[in-house]
Amino acid sequence: MRSFLFIESRGEHESPDVTALLELGGRLRGSGHAVTVFLIQNGVGTLGVGEPWQAMVEQGIDVWADEFSLRGRGLGPKQVPPGVQLGGADDLVRLLMTDGVVAVWH
Amino acid sequence: MTQASQPPEGQRSLFLGLIGTPYESDLLTTTTRLAEAAVRQGHQVTVWTCGYATALTASALDPVKPRNTIAWDTRDPSPAALAAHLLEWAGGRLAWLVCRYCAEERGTMDQMPGVRIRPPYEFVQRAHAADACLVLGTK
C-alpha cells in the first residue's frame, strides 16, 4: 500500500483536471492505497458541490480544507461538508513530511 | 517575529519549487506559509523559484508595494521584503534559490542579498536530495 497526498489548488470551473484528479484519488483508494486530499486556494471552492466530498470521506479518503483559503474567499465552517477536516499550513507540512507519501500539487 | 529556534536533531528537509507566474494565484502566499510552518516544525527548507517567480526577489523591488489608492495609508510589504524577512527569521534554515536559466531569460539576474542564483540542473539534484518535495504551480 502506498500513500498519496493530492493538493488541489484549483476550482472545478478552472480546470477539467480537478475532476480527473479526484477520480484518480478515488481509484487509488479503491485499489487499497491511502489517499489524502488537501484543498487549498481556489480548491476550497469545490466544497460547495457537497455530495462528492461526502462520498470520498465515506470511501475512506482523508479530506482537508485550508481555513486560511476559506476565510479569504468569504467561506467558513458552514460550507464544509461533514467529515472534511479544517486545517492549515502546519497540517499540510505534517502531511508532506510523512514518510513515503507521494505528494501531487494541482 | 523573533528568530526561529534551533532545529532539533535529525531535522528533515523540504524542497518547495515555485514555478510559473506568481501573481496569477495565491502561489506565493502558499509557498511562504508552507516554508514558515516547516521551519517552525524544525525542518530545513529550500525554496526554488523558476520562470517569472525569479522576479519576486529582484533587487530592483522596493520593500513596500506601490500605494493602494483606496487604502492610502496602508503599506504592504513587497515579495522581496517578505522573502528577506523570512530568510532573516529562519536563521539559516531556509534557502531561497533562483534558477539561473529563468533569471537570465527574464532579466532578473540582479537579486536581493541572501538569495542565491543556481544552475538549472540543481533543481533535480536538490529535489531528489530532500526528504520531501513539492512543486507548486505549472510551467
Image (cartoon, coloured by chain):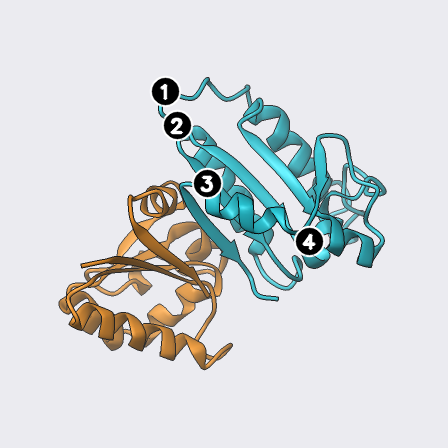
Chain colours: A orange, B cyan
* Labels 3 & 4 near each other (Cβ < 8 A): no
**Badge 3 local density, few (<14 within 10 Å), some, or many (20+)?**
many
Dividing the picture into quadrants, the one containing residue B62 is top right
In this rendering, position of residue A56 left or right of residue B123: left
Please indicate, yes or no, whether residue B31 appears anywhere in the rendered image: no
Counting residues from the N terminus, which is met first, the one under dot 3 or under dot 4? 3
- Label 3 SS: strand
Q: Disc 2 marks which amino acid?
A: Gln
Q: How many angstroms separate mark 3 from mark 1 (CA)?
A: 16 Å
Query: Which quadrant of the figure contains the N terminus of chain A?
Result: bottom left
* Label 3 to label 4: alpha-carbon separation: 19 Å
> Which label was assigned to residue B11?
2
Residue A52 % position (x, y): 25, 76
- Decide: is A22 above or below B49: below
Image mark 3: chain: B
Give residue B77's quadrant in the image.
Answer: top right
Asked if A72 appears above or below B46 in the picture, the reply is below
According to the picture, the residue beneath numbered tag 1 turns out to be B9
